[in-house]
Image: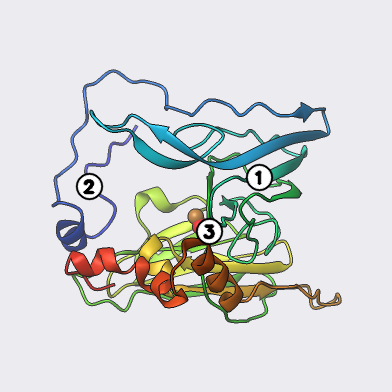
């Protein structure tokens, strides 16, 4: 086994944002299994189909001594539970929102069709409402993530087979490292500023860190037609507009029409729930960065 003692990203950016570069050491702590959240029990399961209910709800957890911390969770009081997708088995999910505001259910890294099933901005579930989605995953075994994705923005493009995407972070060094994520695809990292990617980047990925002043070349391919978001995976950056969308379709087939939730409607709904002006929602996420004296 080869042990890498370096971090796989640029040190100046790490020093600036993440508390300072510390060379890695091999730990002599005993190995332990990955801490996987408990399994979510299906409502029903057959060889061909599995049915789940995922509820976005308010919770409370004792994290620190003293007062409990309020949480937004899925089916438990902290974070969520683990869902298992078996290859070829059809997954049906009831999405329930008992939170006091709208949310979406996004299957980060799962190649499911956009924009409705994928759960980006365009698929809100309003407070007190439920929706049903279903999908079958056909992709290599992997560990994925479920998270909310309520947000703003728009653009359009058409895609054929595999494509090269060059993703550039135009921040000056030592500015922020931007984690670029694309929905609906698993891509390969081909190069960083023309050099080989990091040793941990040889497999398929859905998110890639792009260092300041760097252009990362990706080989991207979409297998399902749909509308997919691509965005910076730092929530405040995404809220601040580092987000767009791409439409993929098969040129040999009739292009599907999607009924898309426009951004104004979404912002108005969120603002109404919170009892604030839409403009206050737009800036909300940015303030934490301003407070730290950072630029995006
Ligand atoms: Cu993990 Cu588009 O998000």
Instruction: Indicate if the residue with disc 3 has its beta carbon within 8 Å of ligand 1.
Output: yes
Give the Cα distance between marks 1 and 3. Answer: 15 Å
Is residue 9 visible in the rendered image? The answer is: yes
Classify mark 1: helix, strand or loop: strand
Instruction: Indicate if the residue with disc 2 has its beta carbon within 8 Å of ligand 1.
Output: no
Q: Earlier in the sequence, mark 3 or mark 2?
A: 2
Q: Residues within 10 Å of mark 2 (few under 14, many from 20)?
A: few
**Residue sitting at 68 percent across and 70 percent down?**
161
Residue with the mark numbered 1? 96
**Residue sitting at 65 percent across and 54 percent down?**
111
Classify mark 3: helix, strand or loop: loop
Quarter of the picture containing the C terminus is: bottom left
Q: Earlier in the sequence, mark 2 or mark 1?
A: 2
Residue in the foreground of this view, choosing between 99 and 249: 99
Picture disc at residue 149: 3
Q: Position of residue 196 (x, y in %)?
A: 37, 61
């Amino acid at each position: 086994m080869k042990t890498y003692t370096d971090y796989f990203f640029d040190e100046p950016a790490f020093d600036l944002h993440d508390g300072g570069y510390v060379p890695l050491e091999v730990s002599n702590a005993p190995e332990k299994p990955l801490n996987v959240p408990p399994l979510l029990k299906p409502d029903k399961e057959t060889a061909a189909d599995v049915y789940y209910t995922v509820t976005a709800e308010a919770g409370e957890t004792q994290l620190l001594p003293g007062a409990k911390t309020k949480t937004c969770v899925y089916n438990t009081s902290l974070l969520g539970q683990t869902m298992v997708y078996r290859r070829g088995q059809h997954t049906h999910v009831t999405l329930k929102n008992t939170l006091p505001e709208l949310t979406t259910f996004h299957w980060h890294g799962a190649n499911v069709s956009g924009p409705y099933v994928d759960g980006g901005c365009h698929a809100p579930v309003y407070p007190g409402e439920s929706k049903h989605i279903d999908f079958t995953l056909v992709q290599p075994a992997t560990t994925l993530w479920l998270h909310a994705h309520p947000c703003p923005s728009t653009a359009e493009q058409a895609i054929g087979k595999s494509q090269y995407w060059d993703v550039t972070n135009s921040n000056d060094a030592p500015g922020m490292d931007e984690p670029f994520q694309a929905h609906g695809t698993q891509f390969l990292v081909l190069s960083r500023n023309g050099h080989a990617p990091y040793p941990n980047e040889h497999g398929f990925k859905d998110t890639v860190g792009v260092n300041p002043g760097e252009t990362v070349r990706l080989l991207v391919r979409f297998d399902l037609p749909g509308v997919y978001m691509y965005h910076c995976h730092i929530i405040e950056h995404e809220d601040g507009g580092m987000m767009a969308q791409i439409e993929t379709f098969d040129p040999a087939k009739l292009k599907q029409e999607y009924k898309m939730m426009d951004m104004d409607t979404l912002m108005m709904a969120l603002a109404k729930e919170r009892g604030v002006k839409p403009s206050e929602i737009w800036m909300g996420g940015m303030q934490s960065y301003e407070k730290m004296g950072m630029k995006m």
